[in-house]
Amino acid sequence: MSFYKKLAALNIELPAVAVPAAAYVMFAQTGNTVFLSGHLAKKDGKVWLGQLGKNISTEEGKLAARAVAIDLIATLQAACGGDLNRVTRIVKVMSLVNSTGDYTEQHLVTNGASELLGEIFGDQGKHARSAFGVAQLPLGACVEIELIAEIA
């Protein structure tokens, strides 16, 4: 099954690629490796605000991370010249979770992105990963995730 059929089966429509909010590009490629800049969680088209351990639950954070993964896939599609079937591997995911000092479930929040990548890309979506708790993210976002992929 193609990645597009998996997206359709999950009722996922890829959004337009985000525009950089500062002095960077959304992705950079060297050889067959594509580095995607950090993407902020969005809900209803706006930055998903909040802090885990304060005013957002782990389950809601997981949904935010899933939403970020959808945006990352849209950017990855652009990096592949419009053809996600060029993706040979999701190599690494790095997740930053806006959280209080005593919150310790960043890894569970990040599962929202990792699980979706696995559903869409199968074995090619299995990746190395880091999940960090941070005191704040740009614009007050609850989650930011970046991704490294290999493409053909």
Image (cartoon, rainbow, N blue to C red):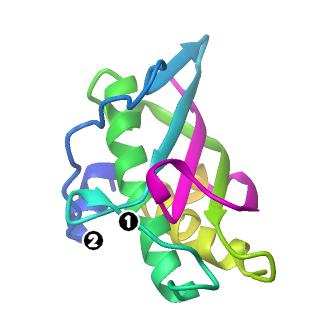
* Closest to the observer, 16 or 41: 41
- Residue appearing at x 42%, y 45% in the figure: 72
Q: Nearer the viewer, residue 103 or 83?
A: 103
Q: Compared with residue 114, is residue 17 higher up or lower down, i.e. above or below?
A: above
Question: Is mark 1 in CB contact (under 8 Å) with mark 2?
Answer: no
Q: Amino acid at mark 1?
A: Trp
Q: Which of the 4 quarters of the picture holds residue 149? A: top right
Residue 2 in sight from this viewpoint? no
- Residue shown at the point (51%, 77%) measured from the top left: 61
Highlighted magenta segment, given as a residue range: 126-152
Residue 51 drawn at (x, y percent): 56, 74
Check residue 48 in the rendering and tell me which mark sits there, or answer none. 1
Can you tell which of label 1 and label 2 is closer to the viewer? 1
Image quarter (top left, top right, bottom left or bottom right) of the N terminus: bottom left
Q: Position of residue 57 (x, y in %)?
A: 53, 88
Say the numbered circle drawn on residue 10.
2
Question: Which badge, 1 or 2, is on the more N-terminal residue?
Answer: 2
Structural distance between the alpha carbons of marks 1 and 2: 22 Å
- Mark 2 Cα-neighbour bin, 10 Å: few <14, some 14–19, many ≥20: few
Residue 10, placed above or below residue 69: below
Q: Is residue 52 above or below residue 27?
A: below
Residue at position x 47%, y 18% in the image:
23
Point out residue 16 in the picture as x, y percentages from the top left corner.
Answer: 20, 40
Residue 108 x/y as whole percent = 66, 79
Residue 117 at least partly seen:
yes
Secondary structure beneath label 2: loop
Q: Is residue 144 left or right of residue 18?
A: right
